[in-house]
Amino acid sequence: AQSVTQLDSHVSVSEGTPVLLRCNYSSSYSPSLFWYVQHPNKGLQLLLKYTSAATLVKGINGFEAEFKKSETSFHLTKPSAHMSDAAEYFCVVSDDGTLGGSQGNLIFGKGTKLSVKP
Amino acid sequence: EPEVTQTPSHQVTQMGQEVILRCVPISNHLYFYWYRQILGQKVEFLVSFYNNEISEKSEIFDDQFSVERPDGSNFTLKIRSTKLEDSAMYFCASSEVGFGSGVYGYTFGSGTRLTVV
């Protein structure tokens, strides 16, 4: 069964410094992995996705994530934080299931709240 | 960019009342989903819907819940008799394809915050 663990519930960085949000996953299949961001009172916005192509995935707003199968990790990074990056970030794995089975439902991590100090 | 639209953004209802949460998925998407997030907890899968029927549902999606696509554009979630523990943010999502849709990803709406008092 698929699962995802976000190792930090809250990360605080200063503006202009790097961001690292950690995620480990467990999957029986070749997983699809996503990072979503949720700004206050907003919906879930897709940042980036990994779907067994390149292991280094570039997303929107300067974020990227690297799929490391040996470490079962999919950490999210950004070289330089901006105040507008303050939000909650969710690491998500897609339960692609077996052929003809699951509809590819999403399994969410608990989320990491990112704070950015001026 | 196409959006999934949810209405209302916030609904307050009395315990025992019926509520209907509405969603307009992206027009060429074929698979529709409801997820919920109780305050402070994970986002959880409720149900997926394709070809006018439920494809899959979680343990949370009991007889109090139902989904419907009453016309070509809306996708609704009905809670028949609300309980206090139904208070949550409910997200609608749609995707272009189902199996393997991880390749394409999902588009989520901005959510409906349901408060049961």
Image (cartoon, coloured by chain):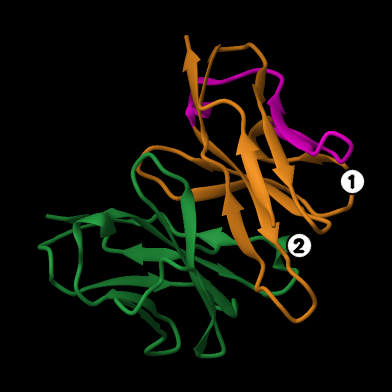
Chain colours: A orange, B green
Quadrant in which residue A64 is drawn: top right
Percent position of residue B91, x then y: 42, 59
Quadrant in which residue B21 is drawn: bottom left
Placement of the C terminus of chain B among the 4 image quadrants: bottom left
Q: Is residue A34 visible?
A: yes
Dot 2: element? helix
When the figure is inspected, residue B90 is found, relative to residue A12, above or below; the finding is below
Placement of the N terminus of chain B among the 4 image quadrants: bottom right
Q: Is residue B47 within the magenta segment?
A: no
> Which amino acid type is shown beneath numbered disc 2?
Val
Badge 2 local density, few (<14 within 10 Å), some, or many (20+)?
many
Task: Give me the disc on residue A54.
Answer: 1
- Residue at horizontal 71%, vertical 78%? A101
Percent position of residue B75, x then y: 41, 78
- Residue at horizontal 77%, vertical 36%? A73
Task: Give me the disc on residue B38.
Answer: none
Quadrant in which residue A47 is drawn: top right
Which residue corresponds to mark 2? B103
Q: Chain of mark 2?
A: B
The residue range painted magenta reads A63-87
Percent position of residue A85, x then y: 53, 28
- Residue at horizontal 23%, vertical 77%? B80
Percent position of residue B8, x then y: 26, 62
